[in-house]
Amino acid sequence: MIDALLSGLSGLVMGFGLLTIENIIMMSVGCALLYLGIKKNYEPLLLVPIGFGALLVNIPLAGMMAPDGLLRHFYDAGVMTEIFPCLIFIGIGAMTDFGPLLENPKILLLGAAGQFGIFLTLGLALLLGFSQLDAVAIGIIGACDGPTSIYVTSKYAPHLLGAVSVAAYGYMSLVPLIQPPIMRILTTDKERKVRMEYPKKSASPALKILFPVVVTIVTCLIAPMGTPLMGMIMLGNLMRESGAVSRLTKASENEIANVVTLLLGLSIGATMEGAAFLKPQTLLILGLGFIAICLDTVAGVLFGKLMCLLTKGKINPLIGAAGISAYPMAARVVQTEGRKYDENNWLLMHAVGANTGGQIGSVMAAGIMLSVLKGMGIG
Amino acid sequence: MDTFTFGITMTIVGMGSTLLSLWFLTLIINLLKRIFPYRESDEKGKEAKS
């Protein structure tokens, strides 16, 4: 009888007995993410489920990522099939107003410059000894776009998914801290005070409806491998601008986006199992991710300076920093920085235009990367 | 393909193609703006809808 009681009770302490130092560290990381999300309000919609997923997956014997585990089902069904990032993109498209970009199309080029960090970081990762496909996954952190990073990484380097997605979302939330010093170093006082004119006429409704259709056809023909991403973001935007399917638009930007964000966050957290995550390689990836965002900002601001020069001072180079995809944080950063030097300088709408250009640019860059890899017969 | 060639190819083709594609898109948007210019009636239609 006593033996039966003792063996029964031993089952209740087995979890404590099997807890490793790696599990404890990762549970602490999970708690830190929860703290950042809840207390500091850094991307709470993502950091809370990611942090909680990290907690769950590090509980011994819970088997959350075992072949029949709950989080394994979410991960396999949504991340490995690439369904989650694509569904999120429909929501992003439904929430995005490309109007400011259509009013001043040339700022779309800033969205291209803001992606240069992807390719430069890819080169750095190769120099540091990462394999070709791992380097592609690391470089894509520079897209500063969570769903794109997850899409590419789950395709080519699923073992890096935890580190890459934590870096992508983490740095995206830190954009207000990372970008301003770079913007100040690269611009002169005079450049920061440049006031940009607002177009007198906005984009016509017909143009706004045609835009997602034309972008889908053109960009997907250039980079067919990016079609799932570009197609979904543009579908969401077409639904928004057409006004014909308001129920679907509302569902895409609310219910669908919310449910998928929750499941995606949990799935990412589930990849943060101690033994697999705690490697020197993870630190390297986080470092390279930071460099990628910095290089994006540098390229965006320098391209902004070039455009300022070519347009004889009609473009404020600060808006180049919004060419990255972190929407709408990067645009807000530009607005805040601009007003520090001229209280009445309203750059927000121009920065939003560059920022939405960055969204298109990041998906385009990812699509090009995937298509070039396909052309090389890699992956 | 060796790593060096891969890195250089991805960097040049990636950056160049992204820039060229978006530049091409700006041309198309400018063309569409000419074909579908903004009209005062658009604003009135919007107001009537709301």
Image (spheres, rainbow, N blue to C red):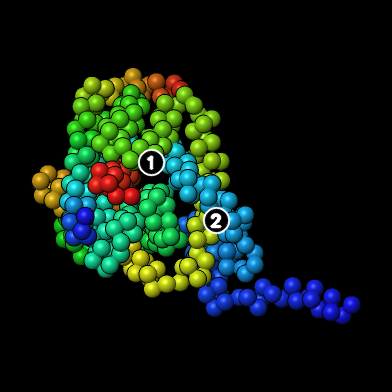
Cα–Cα span, label 1 and label 2: 21 Å
Residue A246, horizontal then vertical, whole percent: 50, 29
Q: Nearer the viewer, residue A138 or A61?
A: A61
Q: Nearer the viewer, residue A309 or A238?
A: A238
The residue that label 1 is drawn on is A229
Badge 2 element: helix
**Quick check: A105 left or right of A25?**
left
Residue A140, horizontal then vertical, whole percent: 33, 54
Q: Is residue A177 above or below residue A330?
A: below
Q: Chain of mark 2?
A: A
Q: Nearer the viewer, residue A118 or A156?
A: A156
Residue visible at 31% across and 21% down? B40
**Quick check: A335 left or right of A75?**
left
Can the viewer see residue A301? no
Q: Chain of mark 1?
A: A
Badge 1 element: helix
Residue A252, horizontal then vertical, whole percent: 50, 37
Residue visible at 59% across and 56% down? A67
Q: Is residue A161 above or below residue A105?
A: below
Do labels 1 and 2 touch, CB within 8 Å?
A: no
Q: Kindly identify which numbered label has been placed on residue A266.
A: 2
Can the viewer see residue A64? yes
Name the amino acid type tagged 2. Leu
Tally of numbered tags: 2
The disc, 1 or 2, on the residue closer to the chain's N-terminal end is: 1
**Quick check: A178 left or right of A127?**
right
Q: Kindly identify which numbered label has been placed on residue A128.
A: none
Q: Residue furthest right?
A: A1
Residue visible at 23% across and 21% down? B35
Residue A319, horizontal then vertical, whole percent: 25, 50
